[in-house]
Amino acid sequence: MKDRIVKSIMITGSSSILCQLITWISTFIVARILTPEDYGLVGMAGVYIGVTEYLNELGVGSAIIQRQDLNQEDVKGIYSISIIVGVFMTGVSFLIAPLISGFFNEPRLVAILEILSVTFVISSAKSVQRNLMVREMKFAAIAKVDVISGILSSMIALCCVLKGLGAWTLVVQYLSMNLLGFLGAFWFERRLPGRITNWPKVREMLSFGVGIMFSKLFMYINRNIDYLIIGKLLGKSLLGNYSLAQTLANKPFEKVLPIFNQVFIPFFSKIQNDRVQVKNNLIRIMSVELIIFSPIFVILTITAADIITTVLGSKWSGAVLPMQLFAMLGFCKYLENRISVILTSQGKAKSQVHYASSLSVIMAISVATLANSFGLNGVMFAWAVCYPLVLIIYMMYFMKYMGLTFSELMSAFKMPIITCFIMSVFVYSVDIINIESSILRLMLKLTIAVIIYITSNLILNRDALNEIIETIKHKKTGMATL
């Protein structure tokens, strides 16, 4: 079973490499042409859109995946409710757009919010169909949808920015990504809304879904309350630098981690009653995953200044320190995500709600207080101190629930951290050499990072590296198995 999981990940992961390359290139080109003010303006709209997206989804996706006795009539009923909620949220957004615009004192936000609110109907439909694909483990199809929608939306963004659309480039990209994602999901999973025939069962699913929704909503709020505060207190220019820094640092989570999650959630849901098996598989899979994620976090941290100044230009220099911080916090976010995946598969939605709500309150208070006194540096201090402390409490609860010891959980991190430390020493040594060309210096650092990291793993962590290599070699066998 574990081999099947890893092969599923490699199928979907390898299929998206081209997509990730194109989206990264697109992001850099768009950011180089746009200004921090453009990103800040859309970032203000994004605070509301993100919160409403979670309310709009109602946790339906998680309920579809977790529910073991789902039938066609249940799907039709859930689909109908999802569409109704999407239409309602779109209408509400049109009504309150002027209020949000007034809060930020940005008149241009009205039109942006009205256009973006259309995505709520699209997302409602897409959520049902995509999560049915996840439930049925149609990972090859999901990968195709993600690759095509990612590439096409990136190309659309490039056309818009070259046409001089400014901040609207980001709006059009978001809309096109959602629409293309829905069309792709519908192509593979052609379901339609219908009449609700079993209200008690649907209510039970919605009850579970709402719990997950609030967990994700609180998590989103604590991750984005800083946007609201920075946009209100510090202005759209600082928000733009901060927003881009998070975008670049969080790329591994936004683009790569969902590939793993769409395999893990249905898998762990199927074995949810065997806690020993869940624990053993979790540690083994994390050990493999961290070989991939750890160097991404560390490389983004140690090359942030080179990436920002060389690729994006000096106008984005204010994004360097936030990018370094959020890249290093990637380890915390990874652990948080893995804990949440297991608890979701175990049906422990309330535990996640308690954690996420507590974190939201603590982060809101600390960010608002420190931002008002120390500006952007205060916001970063809140993330560096308050967030890890609350996560430690969440981790302790999880370990007790699963019967995990601290050493067992941290064993997955041991070798990736050691090999990343060795890599970092060699990369930092490049700064000793007087290289005038910033592009050459960046390329040399990235090349050394890759070579040293692979070499270190071949020497110190050969078994785990061989497991990844063997899985890639047998990717086609894995596809046949699925």
Image (cartoon, helix red, strand yellow):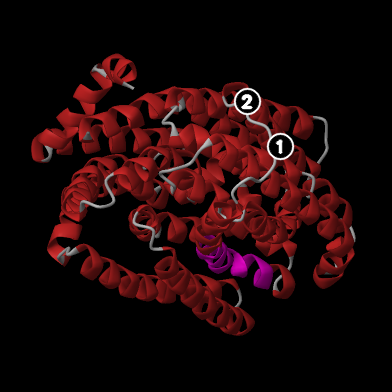
Q: Quadrant of residue 213?
A: bottom right
Q: Disc 1 on helix, strand or loop?
A: helix
Give the magenta part as a residue range: 214-230
Name the residue at 71% across, 67% down. Answer: 231
How many circles with numbers are drawn on the protein?
A: 2
The reply to whether the magenta stretch includes residue 370 is no
Query: In the rendered image, which quarter contains the C terminus?
Result: top left
Left or right, residue 156 beside residue 259: right
Report crowding for label 2: few under 14, some 14 to 19, many 20 or more residues within 10 A (C-alpha): few
Q: Quadrant of residue 74?
A: top right
Residue 16 horizontal/vertical position (percent): 46, 27
Q: Which mark is residue 190?
A: 2
Residue 374 horizontal/vertical position (percent): 58, 81
For disc 1, the marked residue is 173
| Residue nearest the observer in this picture, 307 or 227 | 227
> CA gap, disc 1 to disc 2?
25 Å
Q: Is residue 215 above or below residue 287?
A: below
Q: Which mark is residue 87?
A: none
Is residue 106 visible in the rendered structure shown here?
Answer: no
Residue 471 horizontal/vertical position (percent): 23, 24
Name the residue at 50% across, 50% down. Answer: 63
Q: Disc 2 on helix, strand or loop?
A: loop
- Which one is earlier in the sequence, the residue at label 1 or at label 2? 1
Residue 475 horizontal/vertical position (percent): 30, 19
Q: Amino acid at mark 1?
A: Gln
Q: Quadrant of residue 203?
A: bottom right
